[in-house]
Image (cartoon, rainbow, N blue to C red):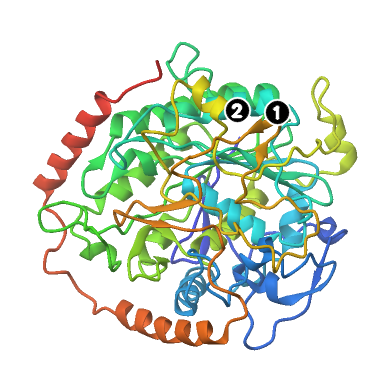
Amino acid sequence: MMTSRITITKARSLILCFSVVSVLGLSATPAHAADSCPASYRQPASNELPLLFGGVFQRCAAGCQPRKDDWSVACNPTQPTTKRTCRPFQTAAVMAAARAELGGAPAQLTPCQLMAYLRHRTLWLIGDSHMKHSYYALRCFLLDAWDHKQGECAPSASPAANAALWRAADTNHTSVLRGKRPMTDVPKCIHLLEGGRICWVHSVRGEEFAAAPSAPEAPALLQVLQGSLASPQDIFLLNFGRWHFHNCIGLMADSYTQSLLQLGAFYQRTRATFPNMFFKVSGHDHTECDAAGNMVDPATRCVPAGQGRYPLSIGRRVADTAVNVLGRHNMSLVDSYALSLQLWQAHTMYADGSVDCNHWCAPGLSELDIWTLYEAFRSHPTLRPLAAAAAAGQQRGSRAAAQPACLPVTSDRPPAEWLSSSGSSSMGREGDEEGADPSSSSSSSSNTAGDAVMPGTDATVGSVAAEGGDAHAGEETNATAGSSHTTDNSGGSSNNSSSSSSSSGLADQAAAAKYQLPGGSDAGGSLSASADAAMQHNADTISSSNSHHP
């Protein structure tokens, strides 16, 4: 079996282990990819964006979902409706970098092309908040491929099965990134209109993915998922790494490497049944350190990687370790690290002037990663578009090929019963960098989704009531900047305010000017090799003494 590594390079090619395939030389999208599509899109006007970078919101011609409900408003690229929305110059920077590295291919991707691989199967997105952003990006790119009135659904119609999945994804591990145990979000899915799902499972630490049966983390997340909810034709996109390192402290190399080894071994044991597993390499974190080696707090700017006063070897080691370990186990890799290293100006910017140099604004790098994932699908040795009959034939045991019933999910936060069963409560936990869903809204004035179950409400997960008084409910935490930003779940400023738009334009000009920094090295430069080694020793010491599940 050939191992594929899809990566973005200056040669404008897709690099695969054991072979090199040019972007322009790849086989055409399968003819049946566009046989059926829930929506169609018109050609762009001169001032409109490509479909992948927000054009889906602007250019739907037929089969469109509502454009004024909260789900869609969160995907509007022209209005700062959420904290994740890019300023225009930021999206332009990502698109320019993509053109320089890849030519025009990403700008040509359509939802129908991606849907060819997603029909009649579940795409499981498993990881930390960066994977959550991938879920948001897919939810927007496929805006017209799922029923907004239905909203988001639990992975199973069984509350017990959903609780078991959450417990397997939850962790007792802290890290160099955060000093407290993370608050693990409730898993949730969107059901595609033509069959299939996209499901997001929040798990921030690699120890939870494929732990051995005797490990404190057992049963492992993938073991629970594949043993109860997943089907052989499903696709798994995995990521961990961010909670194993910190720019100003170092990499917890032992726990990170061991987790990758366990994942690789698990894939070797199970790939005959579950072959469609991909690992997304962590992107670069542009969090700046001060001259003393501490995180800049609060952060008011992001700077190019060579000017952040931290060793560039940390991020590269995180990426290279994943490539080396999982490559040996023949797992397909989705790698945009090299491009992320360049995009220091494409991070989340807040209205108060602070920035999050760890997460990316949208539409931006998360959207470009959709194209990279699509190319990984195309180059995979066995993954092919799936017909309904084939999907039914690949089901195991009593699992039905039909779409599971929707058990509505209306809050990211786990019910009190789930927390108590894990031996804890919400106290003493922190959100994973960014907690609030960008489509959350406490106002229904613009909601035309009828009886849609919307996020951000005091609702339930299945039949279990969400915990009241959770200090993290509706809270976005800018962990990288060291400051928190609390939202009222209103989804941001009004979409129809001309004065807001005018003010935003002035703010955009100021922000763009701030980011036009001169090239060259910062006065502080990168840390020395001895400082790098000292940071690594400190991180390894933390890792070796890290707590485990009771």
Circle 2/circle 1 CB separation < 8 Å: yes
Nearer the camera: disc 2 or disc 1: 2
Quadrant of the rendered structure where residue 521 is?
bottom left
Residue type at tag 1: Leu
Name the residue: 30% across, 57% down. Answer: 481
Which comes sooner in the sequence, label 2 or label 1?
Answer: 2
Q: Answer left or right for 163 relative to 18.
A: right
Residue 272, can we see it?
A: no
The outermost residue toward the top is 214
* Percent x, y of residue 369: 54, 57
* Percent x, y of residue 439: 61, 59
Dot 1: what SS?
loop
Say above or below: 116 vs 412: below
Dot 2: what SS?
helix
- Give the residue pinned by disc 1: 229
Say above or below: 472 vs 448: above
- Give the residue pinned by disc 2: 165
Residue type at tag 2: Leu
